[in-house]
Image (tube, rainbow, N blue to C red):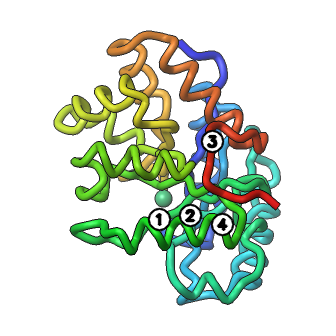
């Protein structure tokens, strides 16, 4: 089993979104992650630019970090940002990227089809803000999840692809997820944990299955990808014109 795990997608921070309801639950989530062998978690509270300003969001996030400063695992800042035209009012999205890097965990609007317009919008977004989207829980979008060409197209733009641990754990969804990991269509696994009840941190359970199905090397690769991201290392060629 992998020695060191990084959870790239969590809603641990208390009182900021639909994640941990209070400090006690947030700390329990970090303890549970530590028990699993997760040394680092990226805190990715939802950021919806139509509901809150960037400045207000960052302020709330800082307050939430302070509230759980006693966490035994390393907590890194980030966000799960919903793609919306409102984002274009800002000149710099670095503060909501993972560890202030170029990587932004991006939630796409839910649509039945992804058109040329959407691919062009993502390209424009990447180039304008000089960022690399990590597409959050790609399994939620049938137009992407059930169409490998669309996943590859996002990857060719330079986007990274994240899947939730639950999709590996769920026996009905597992087959496709495992196949995609083997084909190199998934870069990252995150727990997307929200609480200790219905959506608990469950990263290790997913990695145990990946190890059983595909072997340790695939677990290592997924963890190395997460490690590169928190350290701001560029994983693959990208269309972003870095400034
Ligand atoms: Fe999430």
Asked whether mark 2 and ligand 1 are closer than 8 Å, the reply comes as: yes
- In the displayed structure, does residue 228 sit left or right of residue 81? right
Q: Is residue 102 left or right of residue 175?
A: right
Q: Which numbered disc, 4 or 1, marks the residue closer to the eye?
A: 4
In the rendered image of this protein, does residue 176 appear above or below residue 2?
below
Q: Quadrant of residue 53?
A: bottom right
Q: Earlier in the sequence, mark 2 or mark 1?
A: 2
Pick the front one: 61 or 188? 188
Q: Earlier in the sequence, mark 2 or mark 3?
A: 2
Answer few, some or many: residues within 10 Å of disc 4's Cα (few below 14, many 20 plus, some between 14 and 19). some
How many neighbours does mark 1 have within 10 angstroms: few (below 14), some (14-19), or many (20 or more)? many
Q: Which residue is mark 3?
A: 237
Residue at 58 percent across and 16 percent down: it is 2
Residue 121 image offset from top left, x and y in percent: 49, 73
In the structure shown, which secondary structural element does the residue marked by tag 4 occupy? helix
Say the numbered circle drawn on residue 80.
Answer: 2
**Residue 61, x across and y down, in percent:** 72, 70
In the rendered view, tell whether residue 48 sits above or below residue 69.
below
Q: What separation in Å lies between label 2 and label 4 (alpha carbons)?
A: 19 Å
Image quarter hosting the C terminus: bottom right
Contact between marks 2 and 1 (CB within 8 A): the answer is yes
Q: Which residue is mark 4?
A: 127
Q: Residue at x 49, y 46 (%)?
A: 156
Q: Residue 103: x, y in percent?
A: 67, 54
Q: Is mark 1 within 8 Å of ligand 1?
A: yes
Q: Residues within 10 Å of mark 2 (few under 14, many from 20)?
A: many
Kind of element beneath mark 2: strand
């Amino acid at each position: 089993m992998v020695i060191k795990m990084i959870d790239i997608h969590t809603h641990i921070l208390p009182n900021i979104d639909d994640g941990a309801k209070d400090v006690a639950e947030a700390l329990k989530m970090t303890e549970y992650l530590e028990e699993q062998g997760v040394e680092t978690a990226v805190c990715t509270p939802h950021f919806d630019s139509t509901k809150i300003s960037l400045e207000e969001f960052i302020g709330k996030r800082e307050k939430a970090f302070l509230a759980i400063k006693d966490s035994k695992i390393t907590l890194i800042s980030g966000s799960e940002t919903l793609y919306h035209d409102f984002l274009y009012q800002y000149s710099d999205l670095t503060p909501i990227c993972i560890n202030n890097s170029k990587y932004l965990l991006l939630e796409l609007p839910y649509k039945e089809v992804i058109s040329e317009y959407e691919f062009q919008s993502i390209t424009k977004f990447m180039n304008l803000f000089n960022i690399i989207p990590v597409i959050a829980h790609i399994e939620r979008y049938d137009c992407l999840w059930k169409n490998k060409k669309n996943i590859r197209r996002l990857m060719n733009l330079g986007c990274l692809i994240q899947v939730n641990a639950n999709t590996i754990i769920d026996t009905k969804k597992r087959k496709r997820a495992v196949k995609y990991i083997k084909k190199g269509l998934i870069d990252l696994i995150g727990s997307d944990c929200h609480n200790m009840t219905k959506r608990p941190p469950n990263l290790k359970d997913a990695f145990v299955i990946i190890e059983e199905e595909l072997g340790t090397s695939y677990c290592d690769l997924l963890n190395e990808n997460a490690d590169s991201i928190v350290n701001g290392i560029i994983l693959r060629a990208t269309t972003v014109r870095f400034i």
